[in-house]
Amino acid sequence: MTETKTPSLASIPLDPEIAAPELSNRETKRIEMLNEAAKTLNRRGVTQTSLATIANNVGISRAALYYYVNNQEDLVYQCYVRTCQQLSGLLDAATAKHTHPLEIICTFIANAINENRAEFASLSDIAFLQGEKRSIVMGLYKGIRATLADIVSLGIERGQIRPCDPRITASTVLGLITWVPVTLVWMPDDGPAKNLLSKTIQDIVRIGIACDRKRPGKFERHDVRSFVPLINNVFDSKAQAAARRETLLASASWLFNQKGIDATSLQEVARGLGVTKKVIYHIIGSKDDLVAECCRRGFRFFEFMSDATRKFDGTRMDALCTSLATLAEASVRRDLTPFAPITGLDAWPSDVRAELLGFAAQLRKNYDSVLAIGVTENSIRNINAQAVMTLFPGFYEWMSRWIDTLRETEQERVPDEIANLLRLGLAPV
């Protein structure tokens, strides 16, 4: 089969609302195909995204699909490029419409997340791309972030946005936008709709969730040492086995978060630990077993964090900020990072999927109660708790993939910056 040429960035239309009003039949079909692929990638992950299924869903043959894409990697690449181009176009449109920086940001969010817009690909498996393709997508993302950061900087300069780190703020806003299409997959049927999530992000970005924005935040970090098994007796074989298992799961979780499940092999996990694949098979089992165990460990960590949040000695506002800052720090610690399965939920075996959805539902319930108490004690304003907690991971989930694109001095400030974004928003205090 003759290989098709990967289209240039300019040749992939944004969408009917941004692109030229008249599109060729081929470009219209390409858009339809990429929209379907984005939804499938968000739900099933890269390796479980079937080209044949996508072709069938858009009413073409698999052979005809190769008229638009070369292979699976090219499909992911084009979806990610399209996401970046859409976001860039929407940010430009918001800038053309408003002069107030905060209005630009909120209009950008409103247009990016609404019921009438096709679903974005989440950019969660960027490491699956190789060489130039990965560099192009990362360059597009950095360009959007730079433009958004410039808007934040302009707002700070004018006194229309409170002092904050522009690039961290821009990264977090983008993280929240790209989190929405993924988190909807994890939602129950009666969960918050996309438009409610969009309005909640805008509301938080404007004024945060604190009742008293002038009150200084008193948040630190939860003590996470008790989550990691310790060996107090070197002759305790059970403690040693537990520590080995924890080290293996933490290392695998780091790689899965950073690169995605599909781009991470058992050989890579083993090499990072200085062991053979046989050791992983002996301690855990197959790669599917390893991924499932990393998921369970991740939810145990999130449950540990929700328990620490409930026990926190202070206001519920400070408790939530402490939890968020601790989760942000944990997400970039190789020895601790919990695996947060982003895409691919629909591809999991039904029993594992049910187990994970049960974990997620319990966590939402736990944090919902924290917000309810915060409203009662007047530390948290009356805001839709379910929507806030649905968005909560989006504040830090981006870090495992994009933290290296920030300067080292910025990386150190991320936990406090994102906690203050949740607490205060961006409007001047």
Image: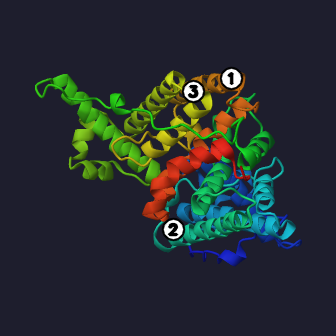
Give me the residue at 29% from left, 39% from top.
247
Q: Is mark 2 on a helix, strand or loop?
A: helix
Amino acid under label 1?
Glu
Q: In this view, does 128 lie above or below 296?
A: below
Name which quarter of the figure residue 284 lies in. top left
Among the two numbered marks 3 and 2 on one chain, the one whose residue lies closer to the N terminus: 2
> Residue 262 at x, y = what percent?
46, 51
Q: Residues within 10 Å of mark 2 (few under 14, many from 20)?
A: some
Name which quarter of the figure residue 320 lies in. top right
Q: In this view, does 169 lie above or below 317?
A: below
* Tag 2–tag 1 contact (CB < 8 Å): no
Among the two numbered marks 2 and 1 on one chain, the one whose residue lies closer to the N terminus: 2
* Left or right: 249 as drawn, with respect to 328: left
Q: Is mark 1 on a helix, strand or loop?
A: loop
- Judged from this view, the residue extending furthest toward the left is 235
Q: Mark 3 sits on what residue? A: 363
Q: In which quarter of the image is the N terminus?
A: bottom right
> Residue 319 at x, y = what percent?
55, 31
Give me the residue at 85% from left, 73% from top.
20
Q: Residues within 10 Å of mark 3 (few under 14, many from 20)?
A: some
Q: Which of marks 3 and 2 is in front?
A: 3
Q: Nearer the viewer, mark 3 or mark 1?
A: 1
Q: Mark 2 sits on what residue? A: 134
Q: Visible in this render: residue 63? A: no
Q: Mark 1 sits on what residue? A: 377
Give me the residue at 80% from left, 68% from top.
95
Q: In this view, does 410 lie above or below 260?
A: below
